Structures are given as C-alpha cells and as structure tokens.
C-alpha cells in the first residue's frame, strides 16, 4: 500500500470537510449533550459521516474507531481512528483552535496521521517512513533543553475529576518552573504544536484514542517522544499521555509520574 498517496488523499479530504465545518461556524448549531461538559453538534456528526464514507472508498477493507460512532466496523488489518471535530466546545463558542484528526493503524500500529487545524488552516501530516509536514513544509520538535526553557501545554478534565488534586499540583509545579502553561482546548492541536516546536511538552489525562492517535504519531515523526504517565506505551487507550521533544522528555516525565502516580 502506498501510504504517501493515502496520506495526501486524507489531507485533501480534511480540506473538503474543513470547508464544510468553517461554513457551519456561523450557522445555527444543533447542540446535543453527551455528558457533563461533553457536547456534540450536527457538524461533528455530518463531518464524521463524510470522512467515513470517503475513507471507506480509499481502503474498502478498513474499519473505524470514530468518536461519534458513525461506523463500528473493524478491519482485520487496517483501522482508522477519527475525531471529526476536536475542540467542539471551542467551535460552539466560535473560538480557535478546532481540528480534524485522522490516523490509520495497520495491525494496531499507527502508520499515518493527519491533523488539520481549521482556524489557521494548518494541516499537519506524516506517514510511516516520512518526516512530518505542515502545509508541505518539513517540521521538527523544538530544541529547548530544560523545563525552565519550556512552554508547556495541557488540557483540563471535563468529566473525570478523580485525579484533579494531583493534576492541580502539576500545574503549580510547571507554573513555577517553566516559561508558562497553556490550555487551548484541543488535544490534537496541542500535540501537533509540540511536533512543530511551538510547545516543548504536552500532558493530559482522561483522553480517548481519537483525541491523540494522529497527533502522537506526528510528534514521533517530527523527532519527539510519546508515552503514558508511567513511561509506558499505553497512551492511546490508557487515557493519559505525555509528549515532548527528546531533550526535556526524561525530566518532564519524571515530574509528571512523581506527582500523578503518588
């Protein structure tokens, strides 16, 4: 399978679906509540159907792990992991960033990732064996060497507050010991901002595979490292993730692990 060709087709798909999403930005949104602070609009659902339909044509034997459940088909070899609109709450309020996130797995290993942030029209992408790109330009993680030099991104939990006390401790630590902490409301965007060097590091808990699959892959292709809070590889389905450049990775993870896993 030609992953470069597939990736470029997915980039084109996010361009098409992105136009629809941006067109709907100022329309009367039909908002539903999936849970406390967890919203979905007709835009999420329609976008996901457009994506699933096109990807089904692109790789007919593939299956899906999709946030809105448009398809529950599972492929024997290939499966797409899709968030049609990461940052829905931002979108509802007319606030950037919000993005489309699409990853492809082959035998449970991610081999392709595309994150298209629609506010700035920035498309980040990579495929197995390729560098990471932003709108056709090769990108890499930053060269910041210490936490003190780092701008750090995170996200706030919106349903699972069981670990909120240690999480608040991490915020206090990084507020005192870094160049600052940012919370922009889209985990997929946070990750690709690590990939292109805008953030040195990102961490969050209570996430789903569609939030992180594409972005985590792009970070790795851009020279970064990704793991869960214990330093293991269970970041897709383990609901926690750490991503950073390779220089601050060890110290960043050590502090996350020490505080979050007391």
Image: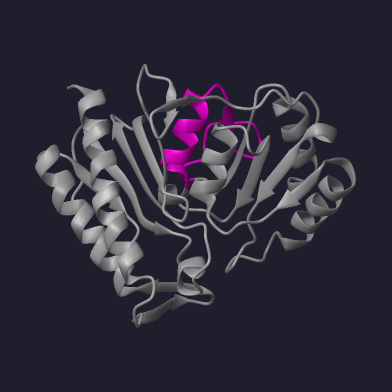
Task: Tell me if residue 66 can be seen.
Answer: yes
Colour scheme employed for the rendering of this structure: one colour
Q: Does 168 sit left or right of 93 as displayed? A: right
Which quarter shows the N terminus? top left
Horizontal and vertical percent for residue 223?
A: 55, 21
Above or below, 110 against 75 in this view is above
Horizontal and vertical percent for residue 108?
A: 33, 33
Above or below, 128 against 118 in this view is above
Task: Tell me if residue 69 can be seen.
Answer: no
* Near-viewer residue (260 or 204): 204
Q: Does 36 sit left or right of 257 as displayed? A: left
Q: Does the magenta segment cover residue 5?
A: no
Q: Which residues are magenta?
A: 212-237
Give the farthest residue toward the top.
Answer: 129
Q: Does 174 sit left or right of 81 as displayed? A: right
Q: Does 193 sit left or right of 170 as displayed? A: left
Horizontal and vertical percent for residue 189?
A: 51, 47
Q: Residue at x 85, y 34 (%)?
A: 148
Horizontal and vertical percent for residue 96?
A: 52, 60
* Near-viewer residue (117 or 183): 117
Q: Residue at x 46, y 53 (%)?
A: 208
């Amino acid at each position: 399978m030609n992953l470069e060709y597939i990736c470029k087709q997915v980039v084109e798909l996010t361009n098409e679906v992105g136009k629809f999403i941006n067109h709907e930005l100022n329309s009367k949104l039909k908002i539903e509540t999936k849970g406390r602070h967890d919203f979905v609009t007709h835009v999420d659902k329609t976008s996901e159907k457009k994506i699933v339909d096109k990807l089904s044509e692109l790789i007919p034997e593939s299956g899906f792990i999709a946030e809105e459940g448009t398809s529950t088909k599972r492929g024997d070899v290939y499966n797409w992991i899709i968030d049609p609109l990461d940052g829905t709450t931002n979108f509802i309020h007319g606030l950037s960033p919000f993005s489309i996130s699409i990853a492809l797995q082959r035998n449970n290993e991610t081999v392709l990732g595309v994150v298209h942030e629609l506010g700035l029209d920035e498309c980040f992408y990579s495929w197995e064996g390729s560098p990471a790109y932003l709108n056709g330009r090769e990108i890499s993680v930053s060269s910041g060497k210490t936490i003190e030099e780092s701008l750090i991104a995170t996200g706030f939990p919106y349903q699972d507050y069981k670990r909120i006390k240690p999480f608040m401790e991490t915020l206090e630590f990084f507020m005192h010991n870094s160049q600052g902490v940012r919370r922009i409301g889209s985990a997929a965007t946070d990750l690709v901002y690590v990939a292109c060097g805008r953030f040195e590091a990102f961490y969050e808990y209570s996430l789903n595979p569609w939030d992180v699959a594409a972005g985590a892959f792009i970070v790795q292709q851009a020279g970064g490292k990704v793991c869960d809070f214990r330093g293991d590889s269970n970041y897709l389905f383990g609901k926690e993730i750490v991503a950073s450049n390779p220089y601050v990775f060890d110290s960043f993870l050590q502090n996350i692990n020490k505080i979050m896993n007391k």
